Image (spheres, rainbow, N blue to C red):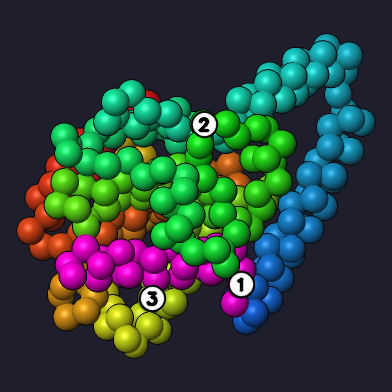
Amino acid sequence: MKKRVLCMMMAAAVAMSTAACGGTAEEKTTAEETAIEETKEEQTEAETTEEETTEEETTEEETTEEETADDEEAGSAEEGFSLGSWDGLTFTNNWLGISLTFPEGSSIGTEEEIRELVGTGQEVMVNSGNYTEEELESTEGESIYDFLVTLPDGGSNLQLMYTYLGEIDLEDIADLYMEEIKSQLLALDSMEYELLDEEDVELGGQTFKKMSLTAMGGVMYQDYYCIAKDGYVANLIGSYIGDSQDVMDEIIDGITGA
């Protein structure tokens, strides 16, 4: 019963996370897409003006330096977003810059298990280790699952997912993303979500937005850790019962940079 409740809660949370970042809610989509498009237009205009000015003032030597810098930037872009890999129970994602180890007895979810939990109605991609660059480049608006690991208690779990929002530079995108998840979850009256705390925390030397909630009268807890990078929003979600809080905290506290 405990495991079933936790799985139901996780499925609901995943669905709401997908809605928040994938834009399935019409009102949210209209407002956020409008803001994003306006931001893109402003950035394009600013970049165009800057490029034209640079071209007029640049000498042959500066042009060479710019081309070299552009080549380096292009090379860096090619080494951009990527999914993580496993070494036993240790997961590492060099792009995200984190590494974490799960305790003995944990179970790493298969692609089939993750898809079953998320539901057939959700647009998702799961890290099976066989993804291609073309597949990654065509995931705008979809949820990408790097892992879902069930802890030794058989019900608590930790998952890492990403959503590609496009080539935008919106400073508060992580805040907007977290606010959308919060509003969606708190609107689920049947789940009785209650917000416990919101703060910024350091994981692997990086600052994540953290939101902690409880649900179903305190039967389970959920912690959301969110960070925006390279047009993606990364969301680390821990769902657990009170007895497993120490185990979850140990995993999170043990996150190091990659």
Q: Report the side of 60 relative to 143 (left or right).
A: right
Identity of the amino acid at label 1? Thr
Q: Are marks 1 and 2 in contact (CB under 8 Å)?
A: no
Find residue 7 and report its image quarter.
bottom left
How far from the left and from the top, in percent, is residue 189? 34, 87
Q: Residue furthest bottom?
A: 189
Mark 2, residue position = 129
Residue 24: assigned label:
1
How far from the left and from the top, in percent, is residue 237? 34, 55
Pointer 3 or 1: first along the chain: 1
Q: Is residue 233 visible?
A: no
Mark 3, residue position = 185
Between 158 and 57, the one nearer to me in the picture: 158
The answer for how far apart the CA atoms under marks 1 and 2 are is 28 Å
Q: Nearer the viewer, mark 1 or mark 2?
A: 2
> Is residue 201 covered in magenta?
no
Q: Report the side of 33 relative to 90 (left or right).
A: right
Pointer 3 or 2: first along the chain: 2
Pointer 1 or 2: first along the chain: 1
Q: Which residues are magenta?
A: 1-25
Identity of the amino acid at label 2? Gly
Q: Report the side of 64 relative to 137 (left or right).
A: right
